[in-house]
Image (tube, rainbow, N blue to C red):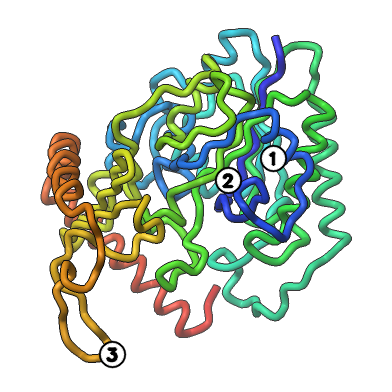
Amino acid sequence: MKHKVIISKDILIPAYLPVYGNRYWATPHIDELASKGTIFLRHYSCAPSTAMAMTGMFTGKFPYELERKDYSVVQDYDGTTLFDYMYEKGYSCHLMWSHNYIVMAERYSKCFGKHTIHHEDRKLNQSVGVHMPRDMSVNDLQPNKQLERETMSYLKDEIESIDTTKPVFLWVHLPHVLLGRTGYGQDIDLFDEFVGYVRRKFGDWIIITADHGNMNGARGKTTYGFDVYEQAARIPMITPRLQDLEIINFPTSNIQLSDIVLKEEIPKLEFVICDSQYYAQPYRKTAIIHGKFKFIYNKLNKLEELYDLDYDPMEQVNLLKNLLHDDDRGRYVNVKQVYFYPYWDEAMSEYTFIKQFFDKIWKTASKHEEQKNFIIRKLKNYKAAIKRNIGLK
């Protein structure tokens, strides 16, 4: 049996990689894997936050299919995970990540198999952006070649420490930014260098992907976890060649990871779903992708959105909104009068079809649970605001 490796990187968006059009970085190892493999053009995370995304990846279930109702410490997943399947097939299972994920994600997922060997390090990730300590100035963060080399040396040593005398199933999850670099998307050359280490040790059965993306400036946002728009939900996926296909351009989900690893195939899903929170949480946003159309529901304000991703890939015009505000003239205008879109009938038919599916899967918690989660979130926001104002960590 051949070794099988998954390498994911936190907040990795397709635009960071040359195989998806990036013109800045050179990634020879990733490019070569892509040239021999399959590139997914419309691959989605089931959730724009790490713990929920990881749960979907290794259980094969969308968040709405789980019994989990909020984003709190959970019990071990009681079903069979991808790690369990690989162990039963005779693989030695390994997980490599920063210690931060034990604190921030593992306890909210609990789906990594009882027999999996954990490789973790406390000095793997660089604190940046929303995860930078509050007492640290953005000007304090500078590239550090020594830390960069120490980070890569640690990763290489951990790869070399894994016994390959029996088949290995390895998942490596790299952080937002590797220690030594200074920002999102600024360590892609190191990412590719690490892929090279892995190739030399385990061969070329390697999957390159992410847990979720980040807004990357779209709609004035630079983070993740709160939106299900394309920048946060769509992620790269590069696999060994599947079904003799160089490119897959129909919607796929990271919950299909088991199909890829175990069966080396990718069946079509009628609907692909991305959820920002579990069903009892008040700020939940749900996206349902069907073909070229994407429906979004915002639980808090009951706002519905519909986008034709072929015609409007940046999701700029909500097809369900009748009026647009013209800021220059200070008045509302009719969308159908000012926005040229030739497929209104098709879009409305799709909306009806997707909404029927949405109504079947949508569920809410009891009023008491809903109120409790709303109050908890309000208190967290209030405490965070106080800390920001008085300069606490």
Report helix, strand or loop for mark 3.
loop
Q: Are marks 2 and 3 in contact (CB under 8 Å)?
A: no
Considering the image in quadrants, where does the C terminus appear? bottom right
Residue density around tag 3, few if under 14, some if 14–19, many if 20 or more, within 10 Å: few
Is residue 360 toward the left or the right of residue 386 in the image? left
Is residue 106 toward the left or the right of residue 311 in the image? right
Q: Nearer the viewer, mark 1 or mark 3?
A: 3
| x, y percent for residue 106 | 52, 40
Considering the image in quadrants, where does the N terminus appear? top right
Q: Kindly identify the amino acid type of the residue bearing the numbered disc 1.
A: Glu
Q: Kindly identify the amino acid type of the residue bearing the numbered disc 2.
A: Tyr
For mark 2, what is the residue? 101
Q: Is residue 337 above or below residue 290?
A: below
Q: Kindly identify the amino acid type of the residue bearing the numbered disc 3.
A: Asp
For mark 1, what is the residue? 120
For mark 3, what is the residue? 328
Q: Are marks 1 and 3 in contact (CB under 8 Å)?
A: no
| x, y percent for residue 205 | 69, 24
